[in-house]
Amino acid sequence: MKYTIQAKAAPKNIYPSTLRLGGTSPQGDEISFTNYYMELNGKPYFAICGEFHYSRYPEADWQSEIRKMKLSGINVIATYIFWNHHEELEGEFEWAGNRNLRRFVELCRDNGLYVILRVGPFCHGEVRNGGLPDWLFGREFDVRSNDEGYLSYVNRLFREIGKEARGLMFKDGGPVIGIQLENELNAAAALWEETAKQGDEYLSGGASGEAGSEHMRLLKQYAVDSGLIAPIYTSTGWGEAPFLEDEVLPLYGGYAYTPWSISDPNQVQKPTPEYVFVNFHDDEAPGGEFNPPYVRTKYPFACCEMGGGMQTWYLSRFQVEPESVIAMTLMKLAGGCNFIGYYMFHGGTNPVGRTGYLNESTTPKLTYDFQAPIGEFGQIRESNHLLRPLHYFLRRFADRLAPMVTVLPEGAEAITPEDAHTLRYAVRTDGKSGFLFVNNYQDHVDMDTHEEVVFAVELGEERLSFPQRSSLTIQAKASFLLPFNFALDGLNLKYATAQPVTAVETDEAATYFFSMPEGVDGEFHIDAEAGILEVAADGGDVAEVGGYNVLIPHDKSSMIVIRRDGAREVRIYAMSAKEASTLWELEEGGQNRVMFSPVPPAQTPDGIEFIGSGQNEFTFREYPGGADAAQWNTVQADATVSGRSEGWFQAYDVEVPLKSIEFTTRRVHDHKVILQLPEDVLEGAEEVLLSIDYTGNVGYAFAAGQLFHDHFYNGLPWEIGLSRFRDVLRRGEIVLETTPRRTGAVSVAADAAMAVEKVFEGEAIAVFHSVTAAPVYRIGLRRQK
């Protein structure tokens, strides 16, 4: 079936923003804004923000995890500063250890990442009282109000944060480019968690209307007075939030999983509108649920809370589909978003406070894994592998995409989230070139597969119809973007049924990497040019039809080489979806390097290190691109690395001694097992990851009678990394327990006396099936000089 879109569009009307934001660093870097995107040194800059809460992660591991985020394509780390993590008892501030904000920000700086501090005072984040200390309640004043009593405490908090972050602002040469004020004012309430239960709201969502705007003005004033001076001030914009015109950039988001919509009488979540294309930056176009209190074309549409996952809630036990995360990003980009932000990008663990557990009552007491792209124990998830190539694309080609206008096909506004049959697509274009966005994912809906798809893009006098030689099938849950009239080092790629990822440029060649969607053959149509001498593909078919049409099978990877007279070669490496999931882009001396590895790497000052679960031997490949192949030495004495040439790549075989994890399991009951691990279980390994297969309601892990981890059952394995629990291992046995998962109904016995007897009728399951343990290896390599 042919799908046509009228993409003839005038260039986007882009002008300097009226936002009184921006600033210059001592190094001469300048941040500014147009009405459509952020700029760095006068050029479009795509902020790719990932949320990571330092106080929910061991300080000793921050650097390693920050490096993982950077290699995942993140260039800005956002983090909440939870008030009750720092001043749990009135007047006693704690900034040491896992609460060392300054150290965390410094590590971000040292690894070349910007930072946005979400200073609150209310944060939410599934933290007790939304992060407000217990002692702040029950006072004469109302929290989140303009009462002088409350504001005096807020001012004191901001001054403490300012002391910790002194010298780390962008204007001082530091990495802090943004300050978020409050969070979800008028949209989320502050529960006093000492007595509240799920659904109880002890307080409203804070000041509203003019009082709310005044509240935000005062918070900004306190932040500035405290030295928290940044080029960007932000606030969450949803839920009719109070808004400071021209002073604060409003941020938005969206989630595929909305556990707050689930209750005892309503156990089924409805599909969200997040996967229907919307033009966020057009005042004439239907905006869906996006109806800001300002002209939409006045400010960039920016996000801080696109669902990188979602924390399980007691009444909502979903499994986050990795496809939901990448589709969310593509939908925001297609709609004109030029500033993306994930909540969460990295999971964590709630600290135990001096007054008890610091979590919100709807969630587990300890785990805050969030099913995020990087898990609670540093696991690299499938969603990370899907997102990473797109992040590299945004970093490399921001100047192309950012100025482009959104165009929706006729009838797009009539599509509903429940519609499983209509193909969803849109375009971003400058009127001559652009990107076709395709989405066939919708949460809580089984989407149709679309076969024999052909797209026709009308660009005024030019009409592009593709593919021409292959059959395009769009599978359920698929989402991707396809380029048209894409510049390749002086050549024109008329269209491709593959997604651009990045490029490596050397004197010898300009090499472009493209990822073919699952099940989609890569068709690349290159305009004929007088200087082209030869077009060849080592694993595909080349036909000369109105130019050069190269067809690559979707399950193969192939290099297309275009030799030119008097110019360097242009190469296109077409990757299968499987291979693209193993691509990592590193930077070294201002030059990017492309690596393929099944084990996640992280860049270090003098090399790389691989952190892999259960993999003591593997092969990675680097693309030299005409440069000399790297020579690697191992950091560990017991590790080996050897290199060899493998076509266009240099391959390296890496191996460390296999570590065997031996432990005993003793079953007390089906719902209770005892693990006995040796005290040296962590020797020779970076981490040991337990994987617990069970069926139940809530899982508990105890040592010497103390709870050290927990889990709300959702059908996925319960994982526990042991390295941060070394003290637990010294106590001896680990006890795993689970309560029953019940399917049925509870009633009160008719003959119940004073003590009401509840009767359950149905199925109740509480059983541990198996427990396995896998070593996590850290293997360091140093470049040979």
Image (cartoon, grey):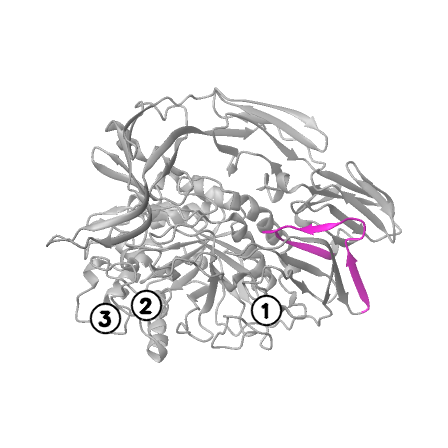
Helix, strand or loop status at disc 3: loop
Is residue 647 rendered to the left or right of residue 717? Answer: right
Nearer-N-terminus badge (2/3): 3
Tag 2 near tag 3, CB within 8 Å: no
Mark 2 residue type: Tyr
- Determine which residue is flagged by label 3: 142
Depth check, front residue: 9 or 107: 9
* Circle count: 3
Among the 4 quarters of the image, the one containing residue 431: bottom right
Helix, strand or loop status at disc 1: loop
Tag 2 near tag 1, CB within 8 Å: no
Residue 119 picture location, percent across and down: 35, 60
Nearer-N-terminus badge (2/1): 2
Mark 3 residue type: Asp
Question: Mark 2, mark 1: which one is toward the viewer?
Answer: 1
Depth check, front residue: 502 or 692: 692
- Determine which residue is flagged by label 2: 222
Q: Quadrant of the C terminus?
A: top right
Question: Residue pushed farthest bottom?
Answer: 210
Give neighbour class at mark 2: few <14, some 14-19, many 20+ (Cα, 10 Å): many
Is residue 267 rendered to the left or right of residue 447? Answer: left
Please name the residue shown 39% across and 23% down the image.
Answer: 661
Is residue 142 rendered to the left or right of residue 330? Answer: left
Please name the residue shown 44% across and 59% down the image.
Answer: 269
- Determine which residue is flagged by label 1: 279
* Rendered view: 5 above or below 101: below
Start and end of the magenta stretch?
461-484
Residue 340 picture location, percent across and down: 52, 58
Mark 1 residue type: Asn
Inter-mark Cα distance, 2 to 3: 19 Å
Question: Residue pushed farthest left?
Answer: 754
Please name the residue shown 68% across and 32% down the image.
Answer: 649
